[in-house]
Image (cartoon, grey):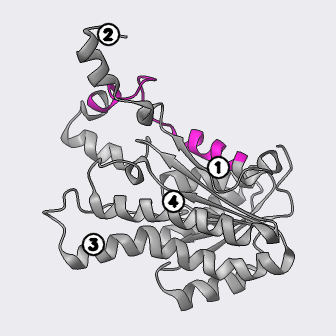
Amino acid sequence: MAGQFTGKTIAITGAAGGIGQWLCRFFGEEGATIAAIDRVEKVNDLVDRLGKDGITVKPAVVEITDAAAVQAAFAGFGDVHVLINNAGVSRYKTLQQTAPADWQADVDANLNGAYTCAHAVLPQMVERRSGNIVNVGSVNGLSALGDPAYSAGKAGMIAMTKAIAQEYGRYGIRSNIVLPGTVRTPIWDERKAKDPNVLKTLERWYPLGRIVEPEEVARVIAFLASDMASAVTGAAIPVDCGLTSGNIVMARELTLEDF
């Protein structure tokens, strides 16, 4: 895969977040120019930090649910060969805690923003008759695991991914989605401050006995974005240390075996 992305521009939303920063570095070290998109000013810090390692970053502070702002940002990036819709947010843990405006806000942030970015980049991909979109969903899009508005947005991303694959495949455009489980990002530092054992509690649900590292998500995204996955489109791939393979906690209890 080394050097395969040299000369290409890869747009990454949520670039200032835990997985986003890993993606920017991963693809930058593979020779890509990074179009880093985030709604917070912290995204500008990537220019200097990654620039020291020879990575070119074009930052844009954009609210991805603002269609006009997204269009303007992509116009400034020029040719975008790969779009990674990584941005996402979860703010409401239960349906009871979620007001209608809260529901709309989380669906906008997780689904409609991804659509807006895809809508902005697809015309140029059609014109070139090549392009690649990788969406970052969640195992929450497959099962009820809490955070219902977030989960609904991520479920919608799966449907959107497949729709793009169906409609735009004739133009040489591929569209896939990864579905991470619990990922070790800075948000878990905050959770551990409240409950030092939170990750240990979670790990027992994962057949591999651990949660996912950010670079593990990045590597699967890199595969899907590369020519190694040239026949893969419309796929929804869990990156979840086995969480969605079954219910290991229940299986242990039923069999009375610690396997």
Amino acid type, mark 2: Asp
Give the residue drawn at x 69%, y 78%: 121
Considering only order in the chain, which callout, 4 or 2, is on the residue closer to the N terminus? 4
Residue 35 seen by the camera: no
What is the crowding at mark 3: few (fewer than 14 residues within 10 Å), some, or many (at least 20)? some
Label 1 and label 4: CA atoms lie apart by 15 Å
Nearer to me, 133 or 252 = 252
Lateral position of residue 65 relative to residue 120, left or right: left
Disc ID at residue 158: 4
Mark 3 vs mark 4: in front: 4
In reply to whether residue 214 is colored magenta, the answer given is: yes
In reply to whether residue 93 is colored magenta, the answer given is: no
Q: In the displayed structure, would residue 179 be above or below residue 99?
A: above
Mark 2 vs mark 1: in front: 2
**Dot 1 corresponds to which residue?**
221
Label 4 element class: helix
Residue 101, image x, y percentages: 24, 79
Amino acid type, mark 1: Ile
Stretch of the chain drawn in magenta: 201-223
Residue 214, image x, y percentages: 53, 43
Label 1 element class: helix
**Dot 3 corresponds to which residue?**
103
Residue 132 seen by the camera: yes
Label 3 element class: helix
Residue 178, image x, y percentages: 56, 50
Amino acid type, mark 4: Ile
Lateral position of residue 234 relative to residue 148, left or right: right
Label 2 and label 3: CA atoms lie apart by 40 Å
